[in-house]
Image: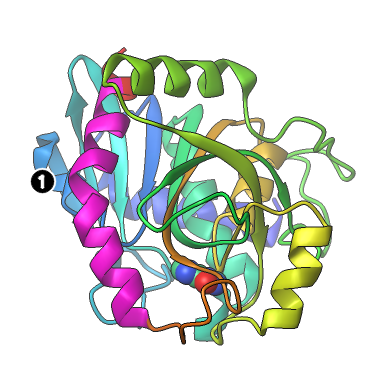
Amino acid sequence: MGAIWARVENCVKDIRRFTDFVPETALVLGSGLGGFGEKVRLAAEVAYSQIGGFPVSTVPGHKGRFIFGYVGKRPVAVMQGRVHYYEGYSMEDVVLPIRVLRALGAKELVLTNAAGGVDKDFSPGDLMLITDQIANFVPSPLIGPNEEALGARFPDMSQIYSSRLQAKAKAAAAELGMKLKEGVYLQTTGPNYETPQEIRMFQLLGAGAVGMSTACEAMAARHMGMEILGISCITNMAAGISGEPLSHQEVQETADRVADQFQKLVWRLLEA
Ligand code: HPA
């Protein structure tokens, strides 16, 4: 057994001391979406600190626990809080939770995040369906010896974000009368926001939004054959677009303002 798989199995064993819940869909909650966890019909709760070797977020306002429960009839595992590469964790640590979720039984993964709008047609408060991603500005989480128990050495990434789940998200948005933008998510290491020239480069590359999470998680999940949906909350226009300086406070304020809409959309598509 490889070292990564052994670590995943240890985490699963620790979680199984608290619950035998088997999720169908896993959900990673980004900034502002944290409240979603409280709406789930609770079956069990496990704090990350109760899981041996599990990474715990250092960002203020990020909780750290799994919530297991139901959205309608659907069994879900919700991650309230994630760790980021900029916190100093290795990529292996950053994507460990995703691998644990797959090992717990989840076949589908919904990734959410707060992101800066790179596409000039976006506005703060927009929700963007992620159609594809650019992850070349961060190291691949798949670097290192490949463990066949996880997936292939050279995994195909030609459709990371499932067209079936994208269609479901669009249908849910239409039912709710909500606008849903679409675009490519680009991940940077952070923690600094970008320069205006970097954002102009990202525009040339075709990115719609920029953020500091998600793409590496999606890559690890796809490696394991999960079906993925990604939605970004555009919390601010990226550097140089509006001329205003960027702040974490603006990111949080917009995420909080849109939280209700964001939660309704995710709830609706999980219920379906
Ligand atoms: N850049 C990178 N990450 C972000 C941003 C941004 O402008 N907004 C929220 N997360």
Q: Quadrant of residue 150?
A: top right
> How far across and how far down the image is residue 96, in percent?
53, 59
- Disc 1: CA contacts within 10 A as few (<14), some (14-19) or many (>=20): few
The kind of residue tagged 1 is Glu
Q: On the picture, is 254 further left or further right than 187?
A: left
Q: Which residue is mark 1?
A: 38
The question of residue 32 being in magenta is answered with: no
Q: Nearer the viewer, residue 243 or 46?
A: 243
The answer to whether residue 138 shows anywhere in this view is no
For the residue labelled by badge 1, is the local secondary structure a helix, a strand or a loop? helix
User: At which x and y percent is residue 85?
Assistant: 57, 75
- In the figure, is residue 44 to the left or right of 245? left
Q: Image point 44% across, 23% down: which residue? A: 169
Residue 240 is situated, as x and y percent measured from the top left of the image, at 61, 79
Q: Nearer the viewer, residue 188 or 49?
A: 188
Magenta segment range?
Answer: 248-268
From the viewer's side, name the closer residue of 38 and 8: 38
